[in-house]
Image: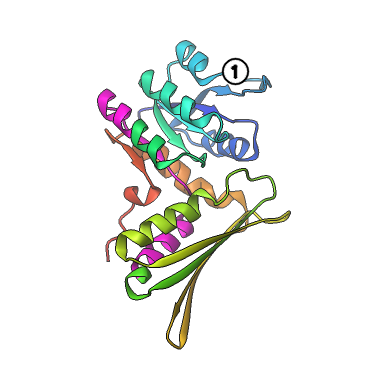
């Protein structure tokens, strides 16, 4: 069994803490270091201020990133330059930035995954919406997240909109809700003559993101390109 050595950036945030907990349960994964831009320390794991510093001092196969839009781009660049495969759940990257990162990964012949959403149900919601867009001319995307989420609209909503428009010249609008008590919610509402179709996904806890994250860590080791969207690791053919 090959052990996958992992650095987690954003390890003291809620998603980072949950990722650490689930990764440490796996016999084939090893967390070798954490990164925290605020300088917090873990009692048992080496902790660094930056991804670059961590990867200069630690040998790692994968960087898991749950940070913020302000630092994620540079984190991914650092990972690719060190030959470490990024698995990224941080949203807020522009498509121009994604394309630049994909080009850098291609140059280095290194795989990675940037996932607007790791919840498998959310991936299916996006796929179903992509199919439905072929048959409707108008749709509204309504997304809701915790009050502290920085990007608006969410990466999931923006990516859903992008996928739908690859299927159809559909007219869409995105509505964002930020409220205490929300985790991650999205409804895509299609309107036609005499009917409404709603495709909805609700993440009731952050646990829903963990199966997709673990799958991405497993499969990224077999990839030689930076993939945008978890669905590209799944068989969603009809």
- State whether residue 197 is above or below residue 172: below
Q: Residue at x 39, y 55 (%)?
A: 162
Picture coordinates of residue 95 (x, y %)? 40, 42
Where residue 176 appears, as percent x and y from the top left, is: 60, 57
Q: Tell me the SS state at disc 1.
A: loop
Residue 7 located within the stretch drawn in magenta: no
| Residue located 47% across and 25% down the image | 74
| Quarter of the figure with the N terminus | top left
* Residue placed most toward the observer, 134 or 229: 134
Q: Magenta region's main secondary structure? A: helix
Q: Is residue 19 above or below residue 159?
A: above
Residues shaded magenta: 102-131
Residue that extends furthest to the bottom in the rendered view of this protein: 194
Residue located beneath label 1 in the image: 49
Q: Residue at x 45, y 47 (%)?
A: 212
- Asked whether residue 119 is in view, the answer is no
In the rendered view of the protein, which quadrant contains the C terminus?
bottom left
Q: Is residue 161 visible?
A: yes
Q: Quadrant of residue 202?
A: bottom right
């Amino acid at each position: 069994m090959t052990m996958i050595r992992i650095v987690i950036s954003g390890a003291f945030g809620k998603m980072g803490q949950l990722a650490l907990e689930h990764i440490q349960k796996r016999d084939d994964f090893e967390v070798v270091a954490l990164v925290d831009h605020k300088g917090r320390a873990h009692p048992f794991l080496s902790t660094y201020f930056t991804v670059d510093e961590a990867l200069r001092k630690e040998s790692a196969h994968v960087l898991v990133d749950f940070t913020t839009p302000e630092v994620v781009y540079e984190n991914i660049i650092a990972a690719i330059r060190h030959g470490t495969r990024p698995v990224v759940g941080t949203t807020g990257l522009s498509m121009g930035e994604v394309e630049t990162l994909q080009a850098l990964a291609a140059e280095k012949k290194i795989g990675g995954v940037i996932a607007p959403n790791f919840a498998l149900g959310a991936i299916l919601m996006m796929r179903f919406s992509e199919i439905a867009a072929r048959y409707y001319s108008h749709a509204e995307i309504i997304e809701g997240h915790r009050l502290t989420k920085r990007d608006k609209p969410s990466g999931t909503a923006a990516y859903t909109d992008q996928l739908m428009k690859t299927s159809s010249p559909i007219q869409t609008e995105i509505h964002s809700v930020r409220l205490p008590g929300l985790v991650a919610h999205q409804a895509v509402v299609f309107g036609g003559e005499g009917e409404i179709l709603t495709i909805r996904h609700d993440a009731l806890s952050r646990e829903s993101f963990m199966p997709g994250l673990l799958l991405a860590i497993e499969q990224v080791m077999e990839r030689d390109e930076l993939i945008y969207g978890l669905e590209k690791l799944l068989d969603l053919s009809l």
